Image: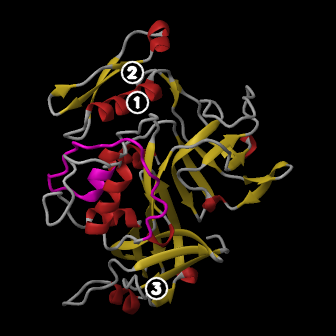
Amino acid sequence: MAAELQIRLFDDNLTTPVLKDDLTERISSLVFTTALNGGFKQCTFKLNIGFDKAWQWLSREGKRGYHFYRVLISEAHYKVWEGRIVDIGFTVQGGNHGLMITCIGYWSATRDQLYSDDDGSRTNWTSGSGHTIDVIIKELLTTECPTISSDQTNIAAGSRDLVGIDLSARKYPQDYINELTKLSDDDQSTWFFAIWEDRVPYLFKRSVTSIDWAVYLENLDNLRLLQSALTLRNAITPVVGTTEGTTQTDATSLVLYPRREELISIQTGSNANTQSDSAQMLVAEKSYPRQQQAFTVTGRIFSVKQTDTGGRLEETPLWRVRSGDVMRIQDLIPHSAATPALDDLRTFYIMGTSYDASANTLSVQPDRRPRRLSTLLRSL
């Protein structure tokens, strides 16, 4: 494992956390991931300890064990990954005892409690006004996600009023957040949600105004470029319940390719503007053959530092790369414009990462489009 990383265990008191142990010297096979939506996703490692100490980790005879205790991976003062323990497996191999630990990030806490706008003094989103995506998500987190930080300053404001949307069904906030981020905004942008350091929530639109990471072909492994037309759709119709809305099309794509249609199901009660936003956003994403690839960084990666005189590249540990960042393969031809843009060739918005500390390798899942998390995790 990289010597610069430190892995510490805290109890489940998030207000005044108590450090229970420094696990750094006893850990092997460390792998941690990020994804969108979500943020910090999963972390697994083997904890090499004797039988007596391993026994104390397990839930037994009315004792709780270490489930839901907080695990923090850091590099000096830089927080690399944070989450809570959900699985503890006791293993014996060749006389050696150890624990296999699985942790998941605090995005999972949005599946602890259920939300319905019919419960208590919740807002009735089907009437009134000013029901933008940020306002709704803030209520979801405030009322049903006590484990998530109350710092909501990183939840970006939406412009489109989602009035009419029906959130009366009892669902996890995570399910509603995934539905809300598919609705886009009045600029047809793509929304993402994540829980990052200190369990702070972030709602943000995809932005590619600058490059975060630069990598060269000599530092990549298993690079495969594939532009696929299988998912090309240039006529998309929103569906609410069983009622179809107005079809949105891409005129240029219809000239170049066959008409390929798709029905998309969106949240019950979504108004006409919201339906149009969602369909327009998706048709812009799907109207051309798009890059579908994954690759592994086995060598060096560089942080792109902006200065008054331009930019410079600074070598950085692989584990700092996370979902939501923008990466460019510097020497992949043909050379695209200097202005950052998703060019389907060498500039990518990162949807998923997986860092293997034993091998010091970073697997990257770049993608222009929002994908289902289950698909992302399978691909990693």
Q: Is residue 44 above or below residue 160?
A: below
The mark nearer the N terminus, 1 or 2, is 2
Question: Which of 237 and 188 lies nearest the eye of the viewer?
Answer: 188
Q: Quadrant of residue 173?
A: bottom left
Question: Which of 269 and 172 lies nearest the eye of the viewer?
Answer: 269
Q: Quadrant of residue 56?
A: bottom left
Magenta-drawn stretch, dominant element (helix, strand or loop): loop
**Residue at x-position 37% and y-position 92%:** 52
**Dot 2 crowding, Cα within 10 Å, few <14, some 14–19, many 20+:** many
The mark nearer the N terminus, 3 or 1, is 3
In x, y percent, where is residue 276?
34, 29
Q: Which mark is residue 49?
A: 3
| Residue 258 seen in render | yes
Disc 3 is placed on an element classified as loop
In x, y percent, where is residue 326?
61, 46
Considering every residue shown, the one lying at the far bottom of the view is 52
In x, y percent, where is residue 119?
14, 63
The residue where tag 2 is placed is 233
Q: Which mark is residue 282?
A: 1
Q: Is residue 307 magenta?
A: no
What colour scheme governs how the chains and residues are painted in the rendered image of this protein? secondary structure
The mark nearer the N terminus, 2 or 3, is 3
Q: Which mark is residue 59?
A: none
Q: Is residue 174 magenta?
A: yes
In which quadrant of the rendered image does the N terminus lie?
bottom right
Q: Is residue 346 above or below residue 296?
A: above
- Of circles 3 and 1, the one toward us is 1
**Residue at x-position 45% and y-position 12%:** 251
Question: Which of 252 and 348 lies nearest the eye of the viewer?
Answer: 252
Give the magenta part as a residue range: 151-177
**Dot 3 crowding, Cα within 10 Å, few <14, some 14–19, many 20+:** some
